[in-house]
């Protein structure tokens, strides 16, 4: 099946595949299905920008269980813009086009372009001036096309141009597979992480130069501490670490997907942003939304609020905190941030202001 036929097939009916990896009134969701009640005003007037999410992954089919991110929810909470991140490594939809990570990634991006952008359900964000202001409810929310896993480049710099031309503006260098750019911080259970590369490769260095040159954001999420440090030592523009949270220890064996304070300090020094997510843990006190807000307060005290941001990984198929079901629950986070003593300015910075600063520098 070629790409066009595949698109036609799932636009018509869908193909089931195995996946990888929060107004003062009652609101009826735009799909007419899920009424929600939230009297919170904590996010009113706040420009929310989520730099890492996988909304509306309908191309995966009904088996994709995580529906926590959608343009419908974005519109309900007036989210200005979200990343629409295609999965670039082979943990996902790997059987569509043989083993071509490039083609698999293109199919995912095409789905959003054909099924959502063309239908005017979201507005494609190619530069920061395209980001709709949240106060303008007549506009659809913005969508920044992204790729999670530089495997999609297949070791070719020219593929950066191809992805840029169709609208990709953020690439997460690594996902669950050691790739031509460098190494991952945590393997996915029961999947092959590929050979360890020993840090940022020469190709990875060229990718950084090229991405900065064309105007893309470098996302260091999922990168191994050595690769992470080497990326930060060669970039000339700010980066994002799009979905993580602070580790309770500096001991490297403990981290998993968490970042140490020393690592987050490097991102701060780079004028970048460490973005935190609603992931629930069993072994550290990060189980309910107020834990998330307290963590943001500590990050403000240790790193400066200008280096802390939101990155939900909505749609990413993980177990979220109690009380967090989907993007609409960001309102609860806004409330909790006020309750722990953070200001409205802090909320603005966290929910999108800091990521907007990085976007302006990187994609103009
Ligand atoms: Zn993700």
Image: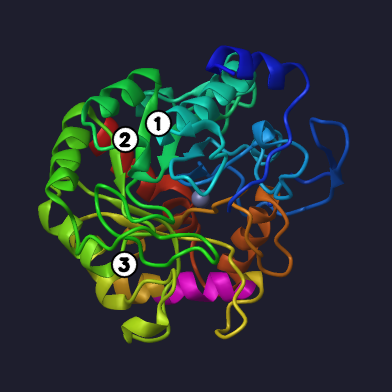
Residue assigned mark 3: 304
Q: CA distance from mark 1 to mark 3?
A: 38 Å
Secondary structure of the residue carrying tag 1 is helix
Question: Any mark on residue 102, and which?
Answer: 1
Magenta range is 290-298
- Residue sitting at x 54%, y 54%: 312
Judged from the image, the secondary structure of the residue bearing numbered disc 2 is helix
Q: Which mark is residue 153?
A: 2
For ligand 1, tell me if the residue under mark 2 lies within 8 Å: no
In the drawing, does residue 252 fall left or right of residue 89? left
Question: Is residue 296 in the magenta section?
Answer: yes
For the question of whether residue 125 can be seen, the reply is yes
Quarter holding residue 26 = top right
Q: Give the Cα separation between the discs numbered 2 and 1.
A: 6 Å
Q: Nearer the viewer, residue 195 or 129?
A: 195
Q: Is residue 120 visible?
A: no
Compared with 319, 160 (above or below) is above
Q: Quadrant of residue 32?
A: top right
């Amino acid at each position: 099946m070629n790409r066009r036929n595949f698109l036609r097939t799932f636009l018509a009916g869908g193909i089931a595949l195995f996946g990888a990896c929060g107004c003062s009134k009652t609101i009826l969701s735009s799909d007419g299905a899920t009424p929600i009640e939230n009297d919170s005003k904590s996010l009113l007037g706040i420009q929310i920008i989520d730099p890492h999410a996988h909304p509306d992954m309908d191309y995966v089919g009904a088996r994709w269980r995580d529906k926590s991110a959608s343009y419908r929810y974005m519109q309900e909470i007036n989210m200005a813009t979200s990343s629409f991140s295609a999965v670039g490594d082979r943990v996902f939809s790997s059987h569509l086009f043989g083993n071509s990570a490039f083609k698999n990634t293109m199919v995912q991006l095409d789905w959003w372009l054909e099924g959502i952008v063309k239908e005017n359900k979201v507005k494609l964000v190619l530069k920061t001036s395209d980001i709709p202001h949240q106060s303008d409810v007549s506009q659809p929310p913005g969508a920044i096309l992204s790729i999670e896993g530089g495997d999609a480049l297949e070791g070719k710099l020219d593929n950066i141009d191809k992805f840029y031309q169709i609208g990709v503006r953020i690439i997460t260098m690594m996902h669950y597979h050691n790739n031509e750019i460098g190494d991952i911080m945590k393997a996915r259970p029961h999947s092959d992480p590929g050979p360890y590369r020993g840090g940022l490769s020469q190709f990875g260095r060229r990718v950084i130069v090229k991405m900065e040159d064309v105007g893309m954001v470098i996302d260091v999420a999922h990168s191994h501490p050595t690769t992470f440090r080497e990326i930060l030592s060669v970039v000339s523009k700010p980066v994002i670490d799009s979905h993580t949270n602070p580790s309770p220890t500096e001991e490297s064996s403990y981290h998993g997907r968490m970042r140490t304070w020393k690592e987050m300090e490097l991102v701060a020094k780079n004028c970048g942003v460490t973005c935190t997510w609603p992931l629930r843990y069993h072994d550290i006190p990060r189980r309910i939304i107020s834990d998330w807000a307290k963590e943001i307060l500590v990050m403000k005290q240790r790193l400066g609020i200008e280096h802390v941001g939101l990155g939900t990984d909505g749609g990413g198929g993980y177990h979220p905190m109690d009380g967090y079901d989907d993007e609409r629950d960001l309102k609860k986070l806004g409330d909790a941030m006020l309750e722990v003593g953070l200001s409205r300015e802090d909320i603005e910075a966290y929910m999108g202001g800091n990521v907007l600063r990085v976007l302006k520098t990187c994609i103009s």
